[in-house]
Amino acid sequence: MNKAFFMPYDPNHPGFLCAQVEYGSLGGAEMDKLQKDIDFETDKGNNAVAVWYKPKTKAPFLQSLNTGQIYIRGHGMPGFKSIEGGRGGERIDFDVVVDRLIASGLPKTFSGKIKLFNCHSAESGAPGSDPECVGPPFARQVADELYSRGYKHCTFFGYVGSIDSFAKDGSEGKHHYIRKNVLGKQTEVARASDGRIQFRPTVKMRTPNIFQRLFG
């Protein structure tokens, strides 16, 4: 299976170095980090490729995808409209993520899975929390935005809880796990896939103009 790890961060942004440090890229610091997940997928027989956004540039691997899986990477919070490219890095709103995914060449015929592989991407914001974190789940916002732009054949998924950025050893072997802070220690709760939720796009119905029908 083809899998793309999509990194939607602008290389011209001052915070791009944070994404490089967090995930690694050619020419960046600690480039082996994202490679851990690529190797993990390769060991399972999948073809995984890291796709870093480049302005005005199509990514051939992304252009070639008709099916498979796309993992959008970055830090997230419940009900937040953005993800962050590494701690202190560029914060990107859901519609900009969609802009950059489309600009990178994803065809509208793509019928695979788009996974918002970000902490809390399946969670709404809690009332009374940070005003920026009281919206719908990030996965919901991305699903609705992509669908509205003609991507009607793919499926969308978000995640609950704080998930491992990279595959780690745990009780069920090497996987991505959900973690919870227990007495100051990040404790394994379940596999990330156990907290994966599908989001079906909200289809907005066009309201007929009754006045036009009556008097047009």
Image (spheres, rainbow, N blue to C red):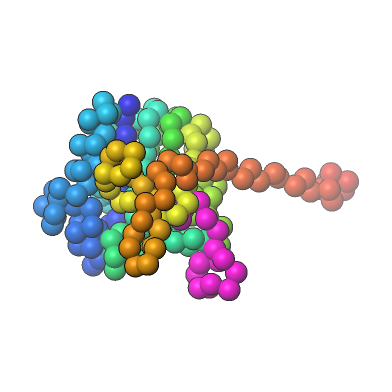
Answer with the quarter of the image where residue 89 lies: bottom left
Magenta extent: 118-134
Whether residue 116 is visible to the viewer of this picture, yes or no, is no
Looking at the image, residue 29 lies above or below residue 39 = below
**Which image quadrant: the N terminus?**
top left
Q: Residue at x 50, y 70 (%)?
A: 132
Whether residue 70 is visible to the viewer of this picture, yes or no, is yes
Image location of residue 53, percent across then percent down = 28, 49
9 left or right of 156 in image: left
Image location of residue 78, percent across then percent down = 49, 60
Q: Residue at x 84, y 51 (%)?
A: 211
111 left or right of 8 in image: right
Q: Residue at x 40, y 28 (%)?
A: 67
Looking at the image, residue 168 lies above or below residue 88 = above
Q: Main secondary structure of the magenta part?
A: loop
42 left or right of 195 in image: left
Q: Residue at x 51, y 31 (%)?
A: 153
* Count of marks, rendered view: 0
Image location of residue 185, percent across then percent down = 33, 63
Instruction: Please tell me whether residue 40 belongs to the stretch shown in magenta.
Output: no
Image location of residue 141, percent across then percent down = 52, 52
Name the residue nearer the viewer: 130 or 58: 130
Instruction: Please tell me whether residue 132 belongs to the stretch shown in magenta.
Output: yes
Looking at the image, residue 100 lies above or below residue 128 = above
Name the residue nearer the viewer: 98 or 143: 143
